[in-house]
C-alpha cells in the first residue's frame, strides 16, 4: 500500500498550507508510520548557511503549529545521501517533505542513493511524501532547465511517472524568456504537462485512486489530457501514467 503524495506549487511550511500538511501527517499515522515530520532541504544545498537556517526554522515553526516532532536532515551531497544513519531516519516518518530550491541539484543528489531508496520504501509502506516547487518537479520523469533552454533535461526520480510539473505556475512565465517557455511546453509524446499555482497542490491519498486539488488557486492541465484548470476540491484520476476524467 503506497502512501499519500502531494505535488505542491509553493508554500511549504507556511500557515496557509498547514491543513494540507496536517492531512498528510494524519494519513501517514493511519498507515502505521511514526508521528514524525521529516524535512529535507536538500534542494537548497547550494545556498548560503543563512538560507539553510531559514528553511530549517520555517519547517520547525510549522511542526510546532501542528504539535508534531520535527526532524531536518542535512542531506546536501551524495555522501550524506548515502549515510546509513540518515537513511535509517527516513524509514518510518509519517510525512517526508522535499522543499524548494534547485530541482536539478535535488534530483542528482538523491538519485540511486540510500536516502532515496528509504524515501521510496517509506512511501510504499504508507508514509506520506510531499514535494514543493523543486521537490514537486523531481517526482516526475524529467526536470527541464527553465532558464537554460539549450541544456538537456535532468532525469527525475519518476515516482509519478510521465509527468512534468511547472510549479509557481501563476508566476512562472514572468520569470523566464519566451525561448525557454516554448521548450518546456513542448513535452515529449506520452508526457503530462501540468502547472501548479502558488499555495496550491495536487494530492492523492493512500486509499484513493483520484487526485484532488488543494489550495487557493488552480492546477492547470496543459498537455497529455484535455487542457483545463482545476480548482480546490476538483478531482482527476491518473490512468497508466496519463490523466483522464
Image (tube, rainbow, N blue to C red):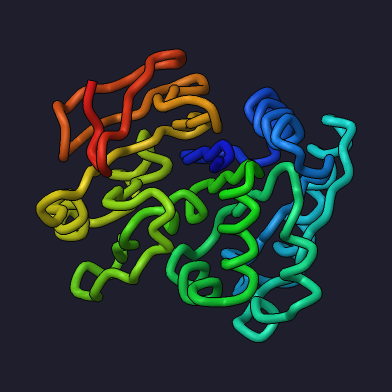
Q: Quadrant of the N terminus?
A: top right
**For this view, does 238 lie left or right of residue 85?**
left
Q: Most extreme residue toward the top, as rendered?
A: 233
**For this view, does 159 lie left or right of residue 127?**
left
**For this view, does 68 lie left or right of residue 4?**
right
Residue located at (20% from left, 59% from top): 180
Q: Where 226 falls versus 172 (above or below)?
A: above
Q: Nearer the viewer, residue 245 or 226?
A: 245
Q: Nearer the viewer, residue 109 or 49?
A: 109
Q: Position of residue 82 (x, y in %)?
A: 66, 81
The answer to which quarter of the image holds residue 66 is top right
Q: Position of residue 121 (x, y in %)?
A: 60, 58
Residue located at (43% from left, 58% from top): 138
Q: Most extreme residue toward the bottom, as rendered?
A: 79
The answer to which quarter of the image holds residue 31 is top right
**For this view, does 225 lie left or right of residue 113?**
left
Q: Where 106 falls versus 70 (above or below)?
A: below
Residue located at (75% from left, 78% from top): 84
Q: Position of residue 102 (x, y in %)?
A: 49, 65
Q: Position of residue 86 (x, y in %)?
A: 76, 71
How many labels sit on residues?
A: 0
Q: Most extreme residue toward the front, as rendered?
A: 1
Q: Quadrant of the C terminus?
A: top left
Amino acid at each position: 500500500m503506497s502512501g499519500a503524495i502531494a505535488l505542491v506549487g509553493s508554500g511549504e511550511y507556511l500557515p496557509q498550507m498547514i491543513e494540507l500538511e496536517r492531512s498528510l501527517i494524519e494519513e501517514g499515522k493511519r498507515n502505521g508510520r511514526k508521528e514524525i515530520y521529516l524535512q529535507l532541504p536538500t534542494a537548497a544545498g547550494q545556498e548560503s548557511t543563512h538560507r539553510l537556517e531559514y528553511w530549517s526554522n520555517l519547517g520547525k515553526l510549522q511542526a510546532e503549529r501542528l504539535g508534531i516532532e520535527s526532524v531536518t536532515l542535512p542531506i546536501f551531497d551524495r555522501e550524506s545521501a548515502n549515510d546509513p544513519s540518515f537513511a535509517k531516519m527516513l524509514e518510518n516518518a509519517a510525512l517526508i517533505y522535499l522543499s524548494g530550491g534547485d530541482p536539478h541539484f535535488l534530483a542528482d543528489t538523491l538519485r540511486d542513493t540510500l536516502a532515496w531508496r528509504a524515501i521510496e520504501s517509506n512511501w510504499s509502506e504508507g508514509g506520506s511524501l510531499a514535494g514543493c516547487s523543486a521537490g514537486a518537479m523531481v517526482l516526475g520523469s524529467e526536470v527541464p532547465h527553465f532558464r537554460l533552454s539549450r541544456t538537456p533535461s535532468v532525469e527525475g526520480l519518476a515516482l509519478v511517472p510521465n509527468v512534468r510539473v511547472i510549479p509557481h505556475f501563476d508566476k512562472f512565465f514572468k520569470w523566464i524568456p519566451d525561448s525557454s517557455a516554448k521548450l518546456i511546453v513542448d513535452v515529449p509524446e506520452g508526457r503530462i504537462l501540468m502547472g501548479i499555482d502558488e499555495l496550491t497542490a495536487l494530492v492523492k491519498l493512500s486509499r484513493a485512486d483520484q487526485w484532488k486539488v488543494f489550495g487557493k488557486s488552480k492546477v492547470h492541465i496543459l498537455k497529455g489530457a484535455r487542457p483545463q484548470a482545476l480548482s480546490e476540491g476538483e478531482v482527476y484520476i491518473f490512468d497508466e501514467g496519463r490523466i483522464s476524467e
